[in-house]
Amino acid sequence: MKINQNYLDLKESYLFSLVAKKVREYKEQHPEREIIRLGIGDVTLPLVPVVVEAMQRAVLEMGVRETFRGYGEEQGYAFLRQAVCGYYAQKGVQLSDSEVFISDGAKSDLGNILDIFSTDNTVLIPDPVYPVYVDTNIMAGRKIIYVNGTAENGFLPLPDETIKPDIIYLCSPNNPTGAVYNSAQLESWVAYALEHEAVILFDSAYEAFVQDQSLPTSIYQIPGAKECAIEFCSLSKTAGFTGVRCGYTVVPHELVRNQTAINKLWLRRQTTKFNGVSYIVQRGAEAVFSAEGLKQIRANIAYYLENARLIAETLKDLGFWVVGGENSPYIWLKCPDGMNSWQFFDYLLAKAGIVGTPGAGFGANGEGFFRLSAFGDRNDVLEALARLRSL
Amino acid sequence: MKINQNYLDLKESYLFSLVAKKVREYKEQHPEREIIRLGIGDVTLPLVPVVVEAMQRAVLEMGVRETFRGYGEEQGYAFLRQAVCGYYAQKGVQLSDSEVFISDGAKSDLGNILDIFSTDNTVLIPDPVYPVYVDTNIMAGRKIIYVNGTAENGFLPLPDETIKPDIIYLCSPNNPTGAVYNSAQLESWVAYALEHEAVILFDSAYEAFVQDQSLPTSIYQIPGAKECAIEFCSLSKTAGFTGVRCGYTVVPHELVRNQTAINKLWLRRQTTKFNGVSYIVQRGAEAVFSAEGLKQIRANIAYYLENARLIAETLKDLGFWVVGGENSPYIWLKCPDGMNSWQFFDYLLAKAGIVGTPGAGFGANGEGFFRLSAFGDRNDVLEALARLRSL
């Protein structure tokens, strides 16, 4: 039996384990010091009441013969796919419920979607980036070309006409930088994808954080996108579902390559290698999209965004170069005094007891930059900012 | 962008859609006739009380800040992996919890495991078979060789020394035939796999139905299996989790190929392309493995097994050739009077209003055979058997 040798080309990710090790060592040396974590990309507010109530009802239904549910459709229950369509309609995007696939999270589908594409495709990935885009393509042995996110382009790279890509990854609002593409920028990406008959894999996991009404929250708000883009979204950050696990993937019927409907290929993949998301979880997700659900989750998002605003404002006051933090839970800053990412990590931990994430962990262009996240408790954020000011 | 052309080699599965169409037509013509479905492989009894209670508690925890849980480990919470180890210990199998991976069901992992193996491997699959084994390998373009399940070998094919396989699928108790390998038979498969340095993918989704203490319920009860086998199991049939979604995959540390620990490769796959199973679901699964949980689910399994016994006994009384139905929820019968699978399907529907599953849908060797399942209501089963006797 031969293993998939491409796996041996993967780099070990030491990012979060090295962060954990350094924090552990610091704590051993300074047991009295309270450490504030602004590094994690995980939510901290509990599920909103409508979601809890919906899942409570669903659990009870499953314990009664008359309302028990066995296998559901692999692509998700119609009630949830229709709720997602309703959410998109509020953005001015019309979808059929057969274009929506319920997932156990964007990470799963971002990885699994590659199943339906040939390994003989050239992949274009912005750097810095969510490491999953890179690793899943290395696993399949695809050729990867990077486009550079830099301070000069505000970490929003645009199409490079010297590259002829087949698969293009975009993430907006971006993880790790918090930068958000405007409509004109996304239009140039859609035009580029159509020109090269490429497919855009659009990760909109942070769309619910966009407050500026002029900024797109779905690639399908751009004309032509349905002919060239698949969109991945998640309730992880939208509704605190990181531990509940639910997301959705949109594959428009207009998306056709090699005379083949990509929607049909993805349906075949999912019906063969997936058995759908828990009924209980899908009822919780449905509740998110109710009028009351949207109201409740938006209150949580406003809380995180206020954290982000406070962090970004303080950093700017202190003279840091910063992107993100306005329509995103992430703040991306340039390390001061020519420090590299890990030097600034050590400095911030030693001098202020603050844990962030070194930008170098997200790609070569992340070196010299640093990510802070707004998912913490308000009091912790305020204390962290006071420590920063007194540095 | 080039699609994965292997997808175009997949055959459309018309099995269940054709069954549904024929039933629909029959109903239109005979609106007064009550149809009894003995075809579906889905459970009908609700979740047991301990599972409902555990999930109720977990949902409430997620609604409170102090007990809310965000991202868990991709391979599952330690509490559940340890519970699975405890379950295996009762079978005399010692596992470390780092050998257990919690999944959203056996189907997902049976498909996804192939990611870590080269496409340049020869796959050996028994026929008739759960169609997922075949389709997932066609998607990757692997060479497939079949071994024949027949009435002569009781649908329990043994190793074929003329074939040199790299990947071997085994399912015991079998879907669709209900046949169960004994220890000597599994020993010959393990010896064969070790000889060829192959890997056995052992699907034990129906292990909880085995009542005969002399029959193995895990491949790891066979000496040497840890060096050559991965085991996939599910709570779908064990505890009625078809709509809840939880299973587990065991990858022993002893399993090494190309000087590479397969456990490490699978962990890398899962941490990159999966984000774990819902916390709520994992708490429900943990409850299954408690003393009270095992007692409650075994009562449900006993109910289904009594259905299976009644069906198999009646069929034998009526002179049918039958396997399964003793340590399995499936009964596999030879169609009478030289009928093929679909002829018998039509006959049974027209004459008795009973819906079963044509064996031809599970592979070439299924032609002329037929699957009945024991997951229905007792009264429906008794009524179906009365109709069969009066035919």
Image (cartoon, coloured by chain):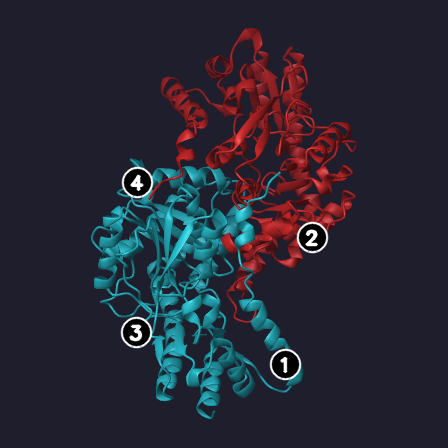
Chain colours: A cyan, B red
In 3D space, how far apart are the residues under numbered discs 1 and 4 (Cα atoms)?
54 Å
* Residue type at tag 4: Arg
Which chain is disc 4 placed on?
A
- The answer to the question of whether label 1 and label 2 lie on touching residues, with beta carbons closer than 8 A, is no
What residue sits right under mark 3 in the picture?
A152
In 3D space, how far apart are the residues under numbered discs 2 and 4 (Cα atoms)?
46 Å
* Residue type at tag 3: Glu
Front label number (2 vs 3): 3
In the figure, is residue B55 to the left or right of A135? right
Q: Residue B333's spot in the image, x, y percent?
A: 60, 17
Q: Nearer the viewer, residue B357 or B50?
A: B357
Farthest front residue? Answer: A162
What residue sits right under mark 4 in the picture?
A257
What residue sits right under mark 1 in the picture?
A27
Which chain is disc 3 placed on?
A
Other-residue count near label 4 (Cα within 10 Å), few / some / many at <14 / 14–19 / ≥20: some
In 3D space, how far apart are the residues under numbered discs 4 and 3 (Cα atoms)?
35 Å
Quarter of image, res A220: bottom left
Picture disc at residue B234: none
Q: Are marks 1 and 4 on the same chain?
A: yes
Q: Is residue B129 above or below residue A202?
A: above
What residue sits right under mark 2 in the picture?
B83
Front label number (1 vs 4): 4
Q: Residue A305's spot in the image, x, y percent?
A: 37, 74
Q: Are marks 3 and 1 on the same chain?
A: yes
Other-residue count near label 1 (Cα within 10 Å), few / some / many at <14 / 14–19 / ≥20: some
